[in-house]
């Protein structure tokens, strides 16, 4: 841990992960949890989160790429790792060298993997991806086109050990009748694929289909694993979206920066690039050492986004810069260089959420958190 905090930093409350996992398990029932730690665990720190999840009994992790899988292996994570995305041919050797499970993003891709494995006299572990409605990766199995033959062929490839099968929900976060019908039909299609495999004498292996909102809104579907990402981090994609369940999540990430300068400006003076903020009265301005290169979206400039300065909520003013932003601290009685500013989290009884940033950025919390950049240290939460 750093001895001091000279610019901006994120604090991760790893103790809250166990609480959040327990809340997920209450909803998921007997369905086991595959911890999704892709994109540096949505900006929270993949290794830190994976180790905390492992302490909760999580034995399977999901990542997006071979790079992310290798990062976990190098950090001592020996549990099962599933690459949800594509691995280039030149990196196929890592799959068997590091005992990593590869998703079969297409039938043609499965043939490439099998040819490599046969040539090198190895067997690669894999999960079959079935496209029941996302139309992103996987073998299409939808009403318009049911490629059951290709799914069966993947299971029968000589040098691919297909250990599981999965699909993905695109609208499990929506509770309209149309979206619920679409999701329920995806489940029906997935179950149809499983039944067809069994009729062919093929054991499907590990079955998983539920993403975070698939867990929140559909509970225990009777499959083997579910795939929460943001949930164990204590947040959902959008606080305004209604959900069926009522979990008690604790956000694990807080974001802070320091005051670098405090000054008074007079009526008529402007702040930051573009002069979009012009003071209409004498105003005390604090410059804060965080900007869009740290992950605070420039899009939220001049939208009355509030941060907490010494326990007082204060609005950002003017355009957010690459490394800095400015805050109206006129109502803060005492503020000086070095004071701690809370961007996300709680301070002296006041709270600001990542969702407030996401709404003003016309985005979702997944993106906002994932965009906190690598130059922002992730530190274990301190006792305040």
Image (cartoon, helix red, strand yellow):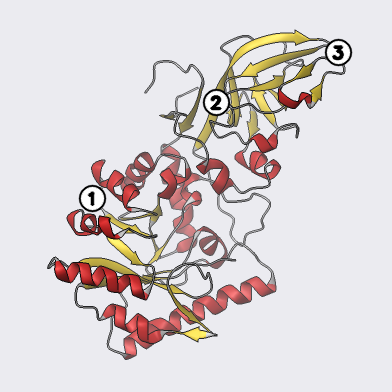
Identity of the residue furthest to the bottom in this view? 199
Mark 2 to mark 3: distance in Å?
Answer: 30 Å
Say the numbered circle drawn on residue 256.
Answer: 2
- Residue 120 in view here: yes
Residue for point 68% across, 51% down: 240
Image quarter of residue 193: bottom left
Residue for point 57% across, 64% down: 217
Quick one: 117 or 9, which is closer to the camera? 117
Among numbered discs 1 and 2, the one appearing first in the sequence: 1
How many other residues sit within 10 Å of disc 1, few (<14), some (14-19) or many (≥20)? some
Say the numbered circle drawn on residue 267.
Answer: 3
Identity of the residue furthest to the left in this view? 121
Image quarter of residue 155: bottom left
Identity of the residue furthest to the front in this view? 90
Q: Is residue 200 above or below residue 67?
A: below
How many other residues sit within 10 Å of disc 3, few (<14), some (14-19) or many (≥20)? few
Residue 260 x, y percent position in the rendering: 59, 13
Residue for point 70% across, 41% down: 360
């Amino acid at each position: 841990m750093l001895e001091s905090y000279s610019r901006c930093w994120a604090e991760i409350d790893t103790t809250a992960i166990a609480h959040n996992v327990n809340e997920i398990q209450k909803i998921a029932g007997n369905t086991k949890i595959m911890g999704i730690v892709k994109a540096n665990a949505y900006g929270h720190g993949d290794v830190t989160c994976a180790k905390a999840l492992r302490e909760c009994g999580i034995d399977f992790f999901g990542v997006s790429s071979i790079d992310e899988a290798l990062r976990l292996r190098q950090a001592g994570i020996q549990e099962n790792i599933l690459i949800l995305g594509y691995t280039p041919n030149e990196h196929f050797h890592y799959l068997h060298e590091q005992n990593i499970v590869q998703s079969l993003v297409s039938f043609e891709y499965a043939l490439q993997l099998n040819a490599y494995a046969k040539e090198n006299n190895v067997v690669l572990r894999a999960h079959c991806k079935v496209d029941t409605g996302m139309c992103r990766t996987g073998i299409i199995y939808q009403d318009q086109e049911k490629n059951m033959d290709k799914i069966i062929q993947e299971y029968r490839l000589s040098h691919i050990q297909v250990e599981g099968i999965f699909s993905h929900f695109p609208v499990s976060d929506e509770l309209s009748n149309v979206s619920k019908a679409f999701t329920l039909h995806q489940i029906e299609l997935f179950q149809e694929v499983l039944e067809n495999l069994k009729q062919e004498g093929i054991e499907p292996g590990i079955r998983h289909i539920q993403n975070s909102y698939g867990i929140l809104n559909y509970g225990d579907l009777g499959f083997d694993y579910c795939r929460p990402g943001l949930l164990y981090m204590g947040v959902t994609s959008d606080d305004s979206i209604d959900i069926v369940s009522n979990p008690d999540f604790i956000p694990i990430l807080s974001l802070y920066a320091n005051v670098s300068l405090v000054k008074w400006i007079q009526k008529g003076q402007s702040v930051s690039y573009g002069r979009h903020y012009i003071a209409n009265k004498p105003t005390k301005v604090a410059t804060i050492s965080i900007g869009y290169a740290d992950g605070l979206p420039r899009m939220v400039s001049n939208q009355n986004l509030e941060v907490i300065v010494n326990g007082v909520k204060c609005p950002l003013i003017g355009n957010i810069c690459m490394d800095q932003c400015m805050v109206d601290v006129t109502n803060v009685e005492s503020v000086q260089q070095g004071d701690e500013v809370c961007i996300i989290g709680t301070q002296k009884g006041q709270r600001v959420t990542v969702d407030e940033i996401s709404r003003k950025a016309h985005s979702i919390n997944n993106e906002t958190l994932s965009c906190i950049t690598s130059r922002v240290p992730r530190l274990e939460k301190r006792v305040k």
